Amino acid sequence: MPDPLRTLAEFLYLLPLALWLGGMAAVLLLHPPRAAAGAAGFLAALRRFDRLRVPAALVLGAAAAWKWSRWEANTGLFHVRYTVIALLIATGLYSALAIAPRLAALERGLPAADVDAAPAARREAFRRLERLAVGAAWTELGAAVLALLLSCP
């Protein structure tokens, strides 16, 4: 008979991981940041995804810690999996709680739909943060895929 607590831990581990993977893939594939006028759509989609990303990171971290403390064997693959999960959570939280608010503040200070009309320093700061957000999104997508593959028995 399966252990109900272990089943719950697996569910609470795989659900946020799958939501994160699907959400980040949708953001990156449906709103490509490099397309003409894609940056605004990408950033808007990323802001909407932040409402899912932060709770998913918290649930994933708690479930991973619970699994680690109760059932996981201490193997080399074990260390790789939890390092990837830590990278995923850290990158996601940094993007949602540090990069996104700074981007939103810069966007509010910029003229509507015209980034080039801003002073050069403000424009460069916005583009730097935008590149950082795109890089973090791709890192999250790769880490989520890898974490899911490493979670398969």
Image (cartoon, rainbow, N blue to C red):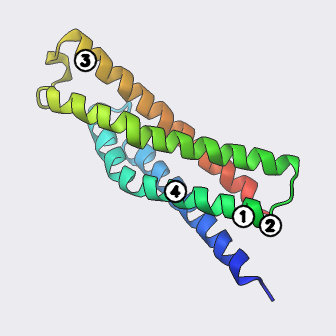
Q: Amino acid at mark 1?
A: Lys
Residue 81 is left or right of residue 88, and the answer is right
Q: Alpha-carbon distance for marks 3 and 4?
A: 33 Å
- Who's the residue at 16% across and 33% down the image? 108
Residue at label 2?
71
The secondary element bearing badge 1 is classed as helix
In the foreground, 95 or 112: 95
Identify the element where label 3 is drawn: helix
Residue 43 relative to residue 26: left or right: left
Nearest to viewer (mark 3 / mark 1): 1
What residue is pinned by disc 1?
67
Determine contact: label 4, label 1, CB under 8 Å: no
Question: For the residues marked 3 and 1, what is the alpha-carbon distance in whole angstroms?
Answer: 45 Å
Name the residue beneath numbered marker 3.
123
Nearer to us in this view, 34 or 150: 150
Residue at the extreme top: 120
Question: Left or right: 37 with respect to 93?
Answer: left
Q: Which residue is mark 4?
A: 58
Q: Amino acid at mark 4?
A: Leu
- Characterize the local packing of mark 1: few (<14), some (14-19) or many (20 or more) Cα atoms within 10 angstroms: some
Which is more N-terminal, label 1 or label 4? 4
Quadrant in the picture for residue 84 = top right
